C-alpha cells in the first residue's frame, strides 16, 4: 500500500543493547500518531452516543408515530441496531486489516449520517413508520461496525507499554458514549413532543438528537479524511533519547504488571490461545446482554411502575443516566491506576461482583403493587397531550396485579451499583483480550469480540421484551442474575489462564532454554 510505504519512510533505526535494530518516531510524527488515536476515540464515542442517545425516547417516539406499536416490536427495533453491528463488525475488521482503518471508518460514518437523517424524518413518512424506524436503527447498527476497526487501530498504533492506557481510554469513550446518550436526550425534552414543524421537517424532542448526531458524525468524517493517518507500532521506541532501553517488548508478569528489559526472541513464537479467546467472548456477551436489557426496558418499565408520562420518563431516565455517567467517568479514570496496583484480573472480578449485586437489587420487593392506568387519572403533568387513563401498568399485563413495585430509591440504588460494575467489566474485557492476542493484527479478533457484544444486544432486547410482556420485570432480572452467577463461576474457573501473550511467550522461552531441553542433555 502507498500509505504503508510512506509510513515506513518516517521511521529511523537505532540499536538497543542486544544489537537488535529498533525504530522510533520523531516528535512530530508522534504527535500525529496520537492525534489519529484521539480521532478514533471520538469515532468510538460518537458511535456509542448514536446508539444510546435515542434509547430513552425510542418507546415514546415509537408510540407517537404508531399508536398500535407493542413492547414486543420495541424489542426488535432495539435489537436491529445490534444485528447490523453483528454483521458488519467482522467485515469491517477484515477490511481494516487489508486496507487500513480510513476506508471502513469513512464508509461507516457516511452510513451513520444517512441513518440518523432517516430516523429524524420518520414523522414525515405517511405509512409504515414503525418499520422505517427499524430500518433506520438497522442501518445505524451497520455503521457501528467501525468500533472493531477503531479498537484494532489503537492496539496496533500503540506500544505494549502504552496499550493498557490507550485501550482503557477507547473503551472508556465507548462506554461513556453509551451512558451519556440519555443525558443528551434529556437536554432536548424542553423542546416538547410537538416542537416546530415546517413541511416534512419536524424538530422536537425525538428528532433533534438524531440531527445533532448526524452533524457531529459529519465533523468526525472530515477529521478522518483530513487529519487521520495510519500507524503500525509493533516494537517502536517512542523515546529516542534512550535508545538502549527497550520500552515496547516488555514482558508482563501479570496482566497490568510490567517486568522491564526483556527482549523478544524472534525465533520463538506461540499461537493465540483460542480457548481463552472464546471464554472472553462469552464473558463479554453476558456483560453486554445485561446492559442491553436495562437499555431496552428502562423507559417503558419506569412508565409502568411509576405512571410517568412520555416526556417525564425521558427526562427522569436522562437524569438517572447523568448520575450513572458521572460514576462511569470516575471508574474509567481509576481503571488504569487500580489495575496497575491490583492487576487486571482482580479488578475484572470486582466488576463482575458489582454487576451481580446490582442485578439482585433490581429485583422488586414492594411494598406496593404496580399502578394501573386509572390511578393516574388525576395526576397533574406538564404535558397536556396525555390521554386520561393511559399512565401506569397496562391492563394487558395480568402480572401487574401480583407483582410488587420496585421503589424508586431501590431502582436508583441498583443503577448506582451497576454503574460501577458495567464500565469496569467492559473496559477490562478489551484490555485483557488485547494483551492475550499479542502483537499480531487484531482487526478480525476485535471484530469477533465486537460481534459477540452485538449478538448480546441483539438477543437481549428481544428476550427482555418478550419475557417482560408475559411475566414482568422480576422474571427478566431473575434470569439475568442466574447468567451473572454462571459468568462468575466461569471466570473463576479460568482465572489463571487470563495471562497476556508475552507471559505465555516467556514461559515457552524458559522451557526452550532449560537444560532439560538441551540437545546435549543426554550426552
Image (cartoon, rainbow, N blue to C red):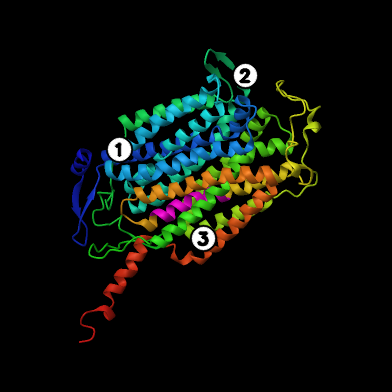
Which residue lies at the image location 35% right of the left edge and 47% below the top edge?
Answer: 443
Which residue lies at the image location 50% right of the left edge and 51% below the top edge?
Answer: 285
- Whether residue 483 is visible to the viewer of this picture, yes or no, is yes
Residue 295: mark in rendering: none
Residue 227 spot, x, y in % from top left: 31, 32
* Distance from Cα at disc 2 to Cα at disc 1: 46 Å
Which residue lies at the image location 46% right of the left edge and 56% below the top edge?
Answer: 280
Which residue lies at the image location 49% right of the left edge and 52% below the top edge?
Answer: 284
Residue sitting at the far front: 127
Residue 32: mark in rendering: 1
The residue stretch that appears in magenta: 421-434
- In the rendered view, tell whether residue 156 sits above or below residue 490: above
Residue sitting at the far bottom: 523
- Quadrant of the image containing the N terminus: top left
Picture quarter containing residue 509? bottom left
Q: Name the mark nearer the viewer: 3 or 1.
A: 3
Circle 1 sits in a helix, a strand or a loop, which is it?
helix
Residue with the mark numbered 3: 346
The answer to if 226 sits in the magenta stretch is: no
Query: Mostly what secondary structure, the magenta segment?
Result: helix
* Distance from Cα at disc 2 to Cα at disc 3: 50 Å
First of labels 2, 3 by sequence position: 2
Residue sitting at the far top: 198
First of labels 2, 1 by sequence position: 1
Circle 3 sits in a helix, a strand or a loop, which is it?
helix
Picture quarter containing residue 292? top right
Residue 194: mark in rendering: 2
Amino acid at each position: 500500500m502507498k500509505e504503508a510505504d510512506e509510513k515506513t519512510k518516517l521511521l529511523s533505526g537505532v540499536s538497543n543493547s542486544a544489537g537488535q535494530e529498533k525504530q522510533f518516531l520523531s516528535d512530530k510524527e508522534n504527535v500525529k500518531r496520537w492525534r489519529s488515536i484521539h480521532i478514533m476515540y471520538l469515532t468510538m464515542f460518537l458511535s456509542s452516543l448514536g446508539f444510546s442517545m435515542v434509547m430513552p425516547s425510542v418507546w415514546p417516539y415509537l408510540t407517537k408515530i404508531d399508536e398500535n406499536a407493542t413492547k414486543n416490536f420495541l424489542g426488535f427495533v432495539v435489537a436491529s441496531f445490534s444485528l447490523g453491528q453483528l454483521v458488519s463488525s467482522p467485515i469491517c475488521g477484515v477490511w481494516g486489516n487489508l486496507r487500513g482503518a480510513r476506508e471502513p471508518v469513512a464508509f461507516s460514518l457516511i452510513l451513520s449520517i444517512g441513518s440518523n437523517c432517516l430516523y429524524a424524518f420518520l414523522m414525515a413518512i405517511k405509512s409504515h413508520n414503525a418499520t422505517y424506524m427499524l430500518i433506520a436503527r438497522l442501518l445505524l447498527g451497520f455503521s457501528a461496525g467501525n468500533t472493531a476497526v477503531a479498537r484494532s487501530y489503537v492496539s496496533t498504533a500503540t506500544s505494549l507499554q502504552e496499550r493498557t492506557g490507550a485501550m482503557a481510554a477507547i473503551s472508556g469513550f465507548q462506554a461513556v458514549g453509551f451512558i451519556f446518550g440519555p443525558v443528551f436526550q434529556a437536554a432536548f425534552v424542553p423542546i416538547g413532543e410537538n416542537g416546530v414543524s415546517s413541511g416534512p421537517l419536524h424538530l422536537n424532542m425525538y428528532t433533534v438528537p438524531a440531527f445533532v448526531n448526524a452533524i457531529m458524525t459529519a465533523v468526525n468524517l472530515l477529521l478522518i479524511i483530513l487529519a487521520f493517518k495510519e500507524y503500525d507500532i509493533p516494537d517502536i521506541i517512542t523515546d529516542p533519547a534512550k535508545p538502549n532501553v527497550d520500552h515496547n517488548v516488555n514482558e508482563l508478569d501479570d496482566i497490568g504488571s510490567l517486568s522491564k528489559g526483556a527482549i523478544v526472541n524472534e525465533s520463538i513464537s506461540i499461537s493465540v490461545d483460542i480457548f481463552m479467546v472464546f471464554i472472553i467472548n462469552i464473558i463479554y456477551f453476558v456483560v453486554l446482554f445485561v446492559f442491553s436489557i436495562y437499555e431496552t426496558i428502562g423507559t417503558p418499565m419506569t412508565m409502568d411502575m411509576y405512571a410517568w408520562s412520555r416526556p417525564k420518563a425521558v427526562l427522569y431516565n436522562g437524569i438517572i443516566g447523568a448520575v450513572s455517567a458521572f460514576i462511569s467517568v470516575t471508574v474509567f479514570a481509576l481503571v488504569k491506576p487500580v489495575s496497575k496496583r491490583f492487576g487486571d484480573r482482580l479488578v475484572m472480578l470486582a466488576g463482575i461482583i458489582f454487576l451481580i449485586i446490582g442485578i439482585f437489587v433490581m429485583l422488586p420487593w414492594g411494598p406496593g403493587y404496580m399502578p394501573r392506568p386509572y390511578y393516574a387519572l388525576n395526576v397533574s403533568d406538564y404535558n397536556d397531550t396525555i390521554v386520561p387513563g393511559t399512565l401506569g401498568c397496562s391492563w394487558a399485563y395480568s402480572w401487574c396485579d401480583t407483582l410488587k413495585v420496585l421503589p424508586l430509591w431501590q431502582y436508583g440504588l441498583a443503577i448506582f451499583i451497576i454503574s460501577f460494575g458495567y464500565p469496569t467489566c467492559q473496559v477490562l474485557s478489551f484490555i485483557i483480550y488485547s494483551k492475550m492476542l499479542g502483537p499480531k493484527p487484531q482487526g478480525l479478533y476485535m471484530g469477533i469480540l465486537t460481534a459477540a457484544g452485538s449478538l448480546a444486544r441483539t438477543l437481549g432486547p428481544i428476550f427482555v421484551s418478550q419475557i417482560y410482556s408475559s411475566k414482568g420485570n422480576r422474571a427478566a432480572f431473575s434470569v439475568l442474575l442466574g447468567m451473572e452467577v454462571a459468568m462468575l463461576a466461569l471466570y473463576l474457573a479460568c482465572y489463571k489462564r487470563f495471562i497476556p501473550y508475552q507471559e505465555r511467550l516467556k514461559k515457552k522461552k524458559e522451557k526452550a532454554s532449560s537444560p532439560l531441553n538441551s540437545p546435549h542433555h543426554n550426552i
